[in-house]
Image (cartoon, grey):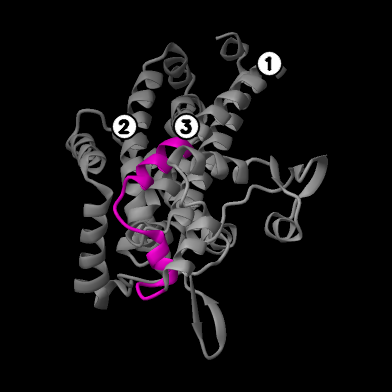
Amino acid sequence: MLRFILNRLLYGCVVLLGTVVVVFFIFNVLPGDPVNMMAGQRTDVATREAIAEELGLNLPIHKQLLFYLNDLSPISVHQNTEQTQTKYNYTTILPIGSRVLAIKAPYLRRSFQTNKKVSEIIGENIEGTFWLAFCAMLFATVFGIALGTFSALNQGSWIDNTLIAGSVVGISMPPFVLGALMAMTFGYYLYDYTGLNATGHLWEYDIDGKRLVLKNLILPSITLGLSPMAIIVQLTRSSMIEVLSQDYIRTAHAKGLKPFVVVFKHALKNALNPVITAVSGWLASLMAGAFFIEYIFAWKGLGSVTINAVYNLDFPVVMGATLFVALVFIITNLLVDILYGMVDPRVRIK
């Protein structure tokens, strides 16, 4: 089991390294000059050169990548100066001449726009994205299982055909198109009936202070959850149909058990295995998928911050947000793999 976990950890590190390299080189081929963003167009040449040197932007791309990896690594090499100590807040492991081998928290650098630490920006905005993804997953799971079960119990009827057609549309519809339609329909044209806002945040501020506005979660979470809900409907339906045809289900009916007990205690319990497998790793996927949904609904979260950073070529924020989501993916998949390995030894063998 330990070897299995170490293999998964190694695989996760390779994925994270690949993410850094790909995003780093993609961002460096985009047009634009971060120095202009930080210093302004009218700044003198000496100031611009000092900024470029401080950020390492005057170096070849491969050296910039090495310096960035050094900043990210928890064990890294730095100049042994008071300024560097303040910047990285490291603990010295071994002096190496004028440098030190040190241990520190990964340093994601500072925003080109605000000069704020990227780690602080992520910490301030991750709450909105997390709750949006969690509510979308909860909505998708509850309604997907309910509708999938209802469809299986009415196999071949017009209800079943309607739910199948609706799930196909839900899977095919791009989230950003669906988001625009939802915001325009329920947040604008039908606002007098729904009372839902087309835009809004989880927290709002007024003269009384900070207050929680849960109704602003409804439209973006439903929009984000519709596509996974459609997948869960089809998974639950097909699994339920297969389970309902098993001999033990017919035996349960023959014993005189109530249909409700047969369906929910015996059939649904065994039919949910593929659904649980699908849902277990979706929180990270929904966090990544929330980016455009946040932008459409003006939701304050990591997604909207990242999209604005892309527009403004704020590389540290884009890279930091990308790495954070990738890390959530890796940790989630690692936990799911370990759980599978503990439950089913055949997974470890494979």
Examine the structure image and report whether residue 26 is included in the region drawn in magenta.
yes
- Label 1: few (<14), some (14–19) or many (≥20) C-alpha neighbours in 10 Å: few
**Residue 307 painted magenta:** no
Write down the residue under mark 3: 18
> Marks 3/1: CA distance?
23 Å
- Dot 1 lies on which element? helix
Q: Nearer the viewer, mark 2 or mark 3?
A: 3
Where residue 102 sits in the image (x, y, percent)?
A: 76, 43
Q: Quadrant of the C terminus?
A: top right
Q: Which mark is residue 234?
A: 2
Could you tell me which quadrant the N terminus lies in?
A: top right
Q: What amino acid is at disc 1?
A: Arg
Of label 2 and label 3, which has the lower sequence position? 3
Residue 44 lies in quadrant: bottom left
Q: Is residue 1 visible?
A: no
- Mark 2 lies on a secondary structure that is helix
Q: Nearer the viewer, residue 224 or 350?
A: 350
- Give the residue at x 31% y 30%: 152
Q: Main secondary structure of the magenta part?
A: helix
Q: Look at the image and tell me whether residue 288 can be seen.
A: yes
Residue pictured at 43% horizontal, 54% vertical: 315
**Amino acid of disc 3:** Gly
In front: label 2 or label 1: 1
The residue that mark 1 highlights is 3
Q: Is residue 75 left or right of residue 266?
A: right
